[in-house]
Image (tube, rainbow, N blue to C red):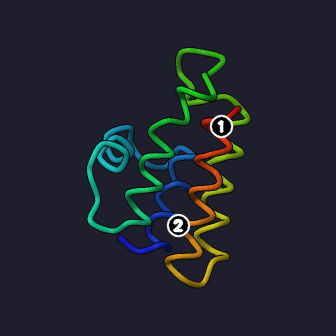
Amino acid sequence: MERYTIGKLIDSFCDGSISDYEWDDFISVKHKNRIADTCAEICNNIPVFYKPNDKISYCNESGEIVLKKIVSILKSTTSEDECIAELEKVNLEMNNQ
């Protein structure tokens, strides 16, 4: 799965244009691509660290900001190593909050 595809999937999830099943497939599967796997791991943990304010939301507003930050990293980094390093920073910040 390429960065563009991952970013588009996360954007689509944020705007509600993909199904819960598509999202679940992304966050629940071990990916061969390091970037996809790292993104899926972070996205899977977002509702744990950014608990939703109601029963229908995936996460709270801070979690939505993290999702948008992931998309920004996917778009702005040029190498796989740089992308992974930036994603790992997000993961570390999330785990330390």
Residue at left offset 54%, top offset 29%: 47
Q: Is residue 29 above or below residue 35?
A: above
Q: Nearer the viewer, residue 33 or 88?
A: 88
Residue that lies at the very extreme toward the bottom in this rendered image: 78
What x and y, as percent, mark residue 74?
58, 69
Check disc 1 and give the amino acid type. Gly
Q: Which mark is residue 41?
A: none
Q: Secondary structure at mark 1?
A: helix
Residue located at (37% from left, 45% from top): 27
Seen from the viewer's position, the closer of residues 3 and 78 is 78
Q: Which residue is mark 1?
A: 63
Establish if 18 lies above or below 71.
Answer: above
At label 1, counting other C-alpha atoms closer than 10 Å, the crowd grade (few under 14, some 14-19, many 20 or more) is: many
Q: Circle 2: is it few (<14), some (14-19), or many (20+) Cα within 10 Å?
A: many
Disc with the residue nearer the chain's start (1 vs 2): 1
Q: CA distance from mark 1 to mark 2?
A: 19 Å
Q: Quadrant of the N terminus?
A: bottom left
Relative horizontal placement of residue 36, taking residue 62 as reference (left or right): left
Comparing labels 1 and 2, the label whose residue is closer to the camera: 2
- Residue occupied by mark 2: 84
Residue flagged by tag 2: what amino acid is it? Ile
Q: Position of residue 77 (x, y in %)?
A: 63, 77
Residue 72 placement (x, y as % from top left): 67, 65
Say if mark 1 contacts mark 2, CB within 8 Å: no
Residue in view at x 61 percent, y 22 percent: 52
Count of number-bearing discs:
2
Image quarter of the C terminus = top right
Residue 76, image x, y percentages: 67, 76
* Quadrant of the rendered image containing residue 62: top right
SS for dot 2? helix
Residue 53 relative to residue 34: left or right: right
